Amino acid sequence: MVNTVACVAAPLLLLAFGMPIFLVFLFSAVLFQVAVMSSIPLQAVPTAIFGSLDGFALLAVPLFIFAGDIMARGGIARRLIEFILSMIGGIRGSLPVATVASASAFGAMSGSSVACVAAIGKLTLPSLEKSGYGRTYSVSLITATGVIDVIIPPSIPMILYAVTAQQPVNVLFLAGIVPGLLIGAALCAYVVWRARRDKMPPGEPVQIKQVIERGRNAVWAIFAPVLILGGIYGGIFTATEAAGIACVYAIVVSVFIHKELSVAQLWGITKESSMLVGQIMIIVAAAGAYSWLITTSGLPTRLVEFISGLHMQTWMLLLVINVVLLFIGSVLEPPAAILLLAPLLTPAAYAAGVDPIHFGLIVTVNLAVGLFMPPFGLNLFATNALFKTPLPQLYRGVLPFFCIYVAVLLLLTYVPAITLAPLALFK
């Protein structure tokens, strides 16, 4: 038992020493095999490594990353955001509301939070500052809205959770729509209230001519999320097939219709996306071996028995899991955090009567919030690098948004119908 506890604690200890995450998983897997699962030959570790990559659903990860990069740099995302900005005006807080709406729309095409922050920030930050919103508030708003990308389908963390917990990706995507929209609505309500409190000037009135012009320019961009999500929920194709179609669509529109990307630029995006995909997949491979050994050892079953022995009520267990996930999510990217914790926490939640789809949304939203939770949220450092805003200012600026996310997270945690009710419509 002591060896088992040591092997489970090993990843956290190695992370504390700054070891790369894929080496953390790989070293922990070997340590677990030697100290706990010595009856299993060491050759099983490389088999588990390659076996963890052999999944059709997992193929959606590199494809959605590639499609998102093309859309972000090929004019599709920019046209969609400009169209949204043109439609929201004439009210106090119209620009912040448009920022939230743009992040939600971008999230329906890409699963990269940092890409969302960069794309939304470049287009909305100058306008926000010009309209009198302070830089700290503007950058904090962009940082907070950027993580909606993790929650709104198609979401890379949701795909990884589905693979790890053996749940259908399309069902998780469907369950994520209402939570994503709920968070967006809560953020919109806050920014409008704050604009009224600070007596910010109303935004420019909507100009029908401009809306029509930008709408015409954004026709292909508007159709992108309709094609991706409509095809999945309409049962026309799977999430993985949708990712492949999104790649082809993005290439055709960006290179041949909008003509904002040359073949040479497309090749450059391909190489950059491949680097990011390689980083994620090597983590998935190493984590797969570690997760397989943990599952084979029977540790999740013993953990469930231990938690049952504590006689914790379900609400209390979920509260503890939320706290753990928030802190882990603030120091680890969502893919790594899911691969580390899902094999342990999912059986415990399921044994407590929590629906695995509902739990998947709890995990995803927690890790999204952790991305900008002070002081270690990874998006805070990304925003600091992109917009040169000092971290102490960011910590103060994101605090109200963090409280909003936590409030919605608690609502989602203890009202499962928010995530599960929409699933009944498609049965």
Image (tube, rainbow, N blue to C red):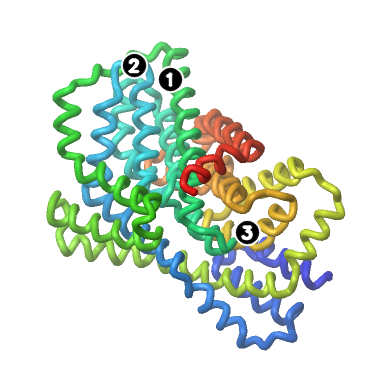
Task: Give the residue type that dot 1 points to.
Answer: Val
Q: How crowded is mark 1: few (under 14 residues within 10 Å), some or many (20 or more)?
A: some
Q: Name the residue under label 2.
A: 91
Q: In this view, does 267 lie above or below 420?
A: below
Residue 235: x %, y % from top left? 38, 55
Figure quadrant of residue 66: bottom left
Give the mark, 1 or 2, whose residue is nearer the N terminus: 2
**Amino acid at pointer 3:** Ala
What crowding class fits label 3: few (fewer than 14 Cα within 10 Å), some (14-19), or many (20 or more)?
many
Residue 408 pos. (x, y %): 57, 34
- The residue depicted at 70 percent of the width and 85 percent of the height is 40
Say what amino acid the circle numbered 2 marks.
Ile
Mark 1 or 3: in front is 3
Identify the element where label 2 is drawn: loop
Q: Name the residue under label 3.
A: 342
**How far, Cα to Cα, is label 3 from label 2?**
43 Å
Marks 1 and 2, how far apart at CA? 8 Å
Q: Which residue shows up at 31% across the image and 57% down it?
A: 67
Kind of element beneath mark 1: helix
